[in-house]
Structure formats: structure tokens, C-alpha cells
Image (cartoon, rainbow, N blue to C red):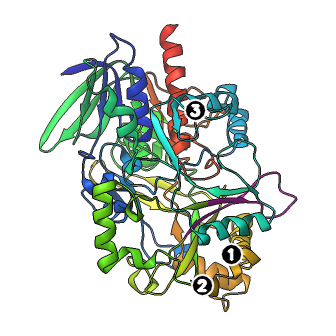
Amino acid sequence: MREFDYVIVGAGAAGCVLAHRLSATPGVTVALLEAGGSDKHPFIQMPKGLAKVMADPKRTWQYRADPEAATAYQPEIWARGRLLGGSSSVNGMMYVRGQPADFDELARVSSDDWSWRHIGAAYRALEAHELGEGETRGGNGALRLTLADRRTPLTEAMIAAGSAMGLARKEDVNDPDNAVCVGYASRTIWRGRRQSASTAFLDPVLHRANLQVIADATVDRIRFEGKRAVELEVLSGSERMVLRARKEIILAAGAMASPGILQRSGVGAAAQLAQLGIQVVHDSPEVGRNLREHRGIIQQWRLKVPMSDNSEYAGLPLLRNMLRYYTARTGAMASAAYEVGMWLKSDRSVPRPDIQFLVAPFSFDYSTQRTALEKQPGMSIVGYPLRPTSSGEIHIRSKNPHELPELKPNYRVTSEDRALMIRTVQLAREFAGQAPLRAFIEAETFPGLACASDDAIIEAYDKFGTCGYHAVGSCRMGSDAASVVDPELRVRGVEALRVVDTSIFPQIPSGNTNAPTMAMAWRAADLIMREAAR
């Protein structure tokens, strides 16, 4: 049996940050476990390789959502990274901090430890932005960030159209002011390479003697002595090993996996665990509940002029772009999923943006299930309400750690969510109709202007919508006794066990979740070290 002070489960955005910070103290031993393998593959490092990586079952968990009315009873896959770096090694590389109000609201339901004052400081500490250090932006951290750099008359028209709608154009769209804005997207890309959490936070510290990274290690369950978490049973191939934690076990496996580890270990709804023959350590009914996810729709327009990227990813242009990438690390293959970001209010009366658009100079061929781009020039927007009020569930089906859980999205069950989904489509059409962009557009091609009524828009979401890959909430943090973890991320009802990943957010921070997860983990390390110092 091997012993460490801290054993961290999951080498994704949160786990890599935690390993980076906790192992910085000499004499404190840290083990970081990852169910997948290496992230050193050319398609992972190359930003535009993301489509191939996301579809690779060797490098992703392919969670299958239960069909429901909101998905037109079709199957839907929620993919997550299964490799070092976790989902930060397979995502679209959008770096969206969320709004300061997100964290101040989190503080109101937990503690001041999670207010923007602390989270803003965490962002400044971890960032190395190409714009340099500023009052609210980091310039010397481990995570290198850049702005979208493939700027054309079309992308400039996109930003001008946002300005025409009253959105402030920002050089850095992450400036923290809770305001509507438009600008070139911030990206986790540096010199043409993906900056995953493992690249930024883990690779530079692998030399530390007090840090051990154990890949291809699937956690079966946590062992308790009384109420204290002391050991992990881990599967690696056909072998089973046990790791002991002298101080704490920290789950950083994400909103999809951390609930399952807790449930297999006896922490969850007692009745459900009993049905599976699992001995109850602590009855915690909210484990696996309160799951929140973005439900997006991709709207598309045909362009009058050949300014889109549709032709860049097929045939000779693709070969040319691949050659350019491998010789200079620039060009189409060095860009992230989207070029332009927009944060809008559904109505002037709402206090802060509640809808996000990510805008791209390309359009998908829906006849290929969006696996290829259209041959004609086009542009697209993926849009979604930022803070959904509908919640789903995720629960284990058995004791088998290799069996994927039951996933119920439960999209759009509230009237608030349905109204915002409809408004998202309407605002995208207003955006496309602005003079700076209208000159480039021939017609809306998807879902098409025939999709006009509220019912037709919801039907389009159901048939053609997409999950945002931004799930949170399944191990909710709060100051109330029903929450799964307390304001210091300690699992209620047991000892020496924390959860540090997206599952602790009661609501999705306003945007993509990679950046908030890293900032949350940075702050969590402060709290863990503060407690150790006591």
C-alpha cells in the first residue's frame, strides 16, 4: 500500500491546479490519479484537432443521456476528457471567466470565501494573458492565454453588428463588470498549441519528488474508517491497488464522475444505495441531483461572399493549412472553436447578461450530423441561456466503476428556460440583421425563417439542439445542511473528503466552465492549505 498526504482523483482542470499548488509545499506528498492516459498526441496539441479528439472513445468518456422530449427522444452524448488534462485537453479552448455576480451569488449561498474578491484574485494569480497584467487580469501565471487572431472583414462585421445592438466592444471580453459586451474570444492557446490544464499546471511540476501522477487508474470506491475517508481502491487494468491518504482524499473527477464515486463509496441517497447493495456511510440525497447544463442551438446563415472558413478544412486547402500549422504553428488549424464572443440581455430590465453567443466564420452540413462543413460559404452562432433553472440527475446503475451512469438531462422544464431559449433565437436573428453584417448575408439556412413561432423554435431545439459540455451542480456546495459539500468543499457527514470540481457549483457560471473550474480549484487550494496550517 502506498501512502500520501493528499490523493487527488481526476487530472482535469481542477485536479491539475490542485496538484500544482499542494505539491508546492516541500514535504507534502501528493498523488494525482487519472483514469485515462497521456495527452501528448498531435491532434490534442493542435487546436483544430478537437473534433477528432472529442469523438475518440479512447480519450473521452461518452456519457449517454436518456432520451426525453427535450431531445426529441433521440440519444445525446455528453463527452468528457479521459486523459491528462481532462476536458481541458479536448474542449473548444474558450476562456470565459463568468461574471463577478456569479461568484458573489455563490458566496451568498455558501461563504465569503467564494466572493468575486477572492475568485478575481485567483484568476489574476493563474493567468498569463497576452494583453499583459492589468488591474483585473493576470500576466505572470502558469496558464497562457491569447485572443483570437484570425481577423477578417467578416469577423470585424460580426463585432460591429454586436456594437450596433448596443453591446460594448471590449479588447478583453473577460473584464469583470457584469455588462453586455462583444469582442474577440480569449483562448487557451499559446504559440499555436492548446494550453490544457496539464500543459499549464502539471507539466512544469512533474519533476517534484513529492508529486506522483498515476495514469490509467480508475477509482472504484473510497474506504472509510468510521466516518473518516482513509483509502482509495483503484483499478489499473486487471490489477487492484489501494492508496492511503494521511490528510485528505479530494475528488476532482467532474460533475459526471464525482457523484458516482461518492455513491459507490456509500455517500448518497440511502434508499438508492440499499437497492444496489451498497452499505450506507452517510445518507446524502442530493448527491447526483441539481445537475445543470446549457442547451444550445446552432443557427446558420449563407454568405454572399466567399469569406467563410468552410473551404479551409477540406481538399487542398486543408493540406495547405496542415503544412502551415506544422511548419509555423499558425493559420486555420491554430484557431479555437469560435472567434467572437457576445454576452447579451434578453431584456433591458434584467440586471446582467443572461444569453451567450459564440460566433464563427463557418457553417455545418447538417446532412452529416455536423461532422463536415457546408461547401457554400456560411457563418454560424451557438447560443444558449446562461443560467438554466431546469435541473437533471446523474446516478450509478451498479457497483461497477466501468459502467457509465444513468443521465437524465431534464432540459427546459421551466417556463423561464423555454422563454430564454426562444429569445436566444430571436436575438441571433436581430444580430444577423444589423447593417454591418447584413451586407455579407444572403439568407438564414438553419433553422430557417419558417421556424418562426415559439413552438417551432422549441421544436428546433429539441430536434437539433446540443448540450454545452458545461454540466455542474451534482455535488452542490452550500451553507445549508442538505448540500453535498460545505463552503470549504468538505463532504458533509464524513471526514477527510472534499469535492473540488464543477459538480460543486449550484449554478453554471455565466459561460464556459473551464476557466471558473481552474479559479475555483486555485481558491480551494487556499482553503485546504489554510486548514492544514491550523
Residue under numbered circle 1: 425
Q: Give the crowd class for mark 1: few <14, some 14-19, many >=20 residues within 10 Å.
A: many
Inspect the image, locate mark 3, and give the three-letter code of the amino acid beneath it: Gly
For the point 49% across and 62% down, the residue is: 408
| Outermost residue, bottom side | 450
Quarter holding residue 261 = top left
Earlier residue among tags 1 and 3: 3
Vertical side of 252 occupied by 192: above or below: below
For the point 59% across and 31% down, the residue is: 124
| Outermost residue, left side | 238
Between 214 and 94, the one nearer to me in the picture: 94
Residue under numbered circle 3: 138
Is 351 magenta? The answer is yes
Q: Give the crowd class for mark 2: few <14, some 14-19, many >=20 residues within 10 Å.
A: some
Vertical side of 466 occupied by 501: above or below: above
Q: Is residue 413 visible?
A: no
Task: Where is residue 296? Give x, y as percent.
Answer: 58, 68
Q: Is residue 323 visible?
A: yes
- Where disc 1 sits, the SS reads helix
- Where disc 2 sits, the SS reads loop
Question: Do tag 1 and tag 3 residues touch (Cβ < 8 Å)?
Answer: no
| Left or right: 235 as drawn, with respect to 130 | left
Quarter holding residue 453 = bottom right
Residue under numbered circle 2: 447
Question: Do tag 2 and tag 1 residues touch (Cβ < 8 Å)?
Answer: yes
Earlier residue among tags 3 and 2: 3
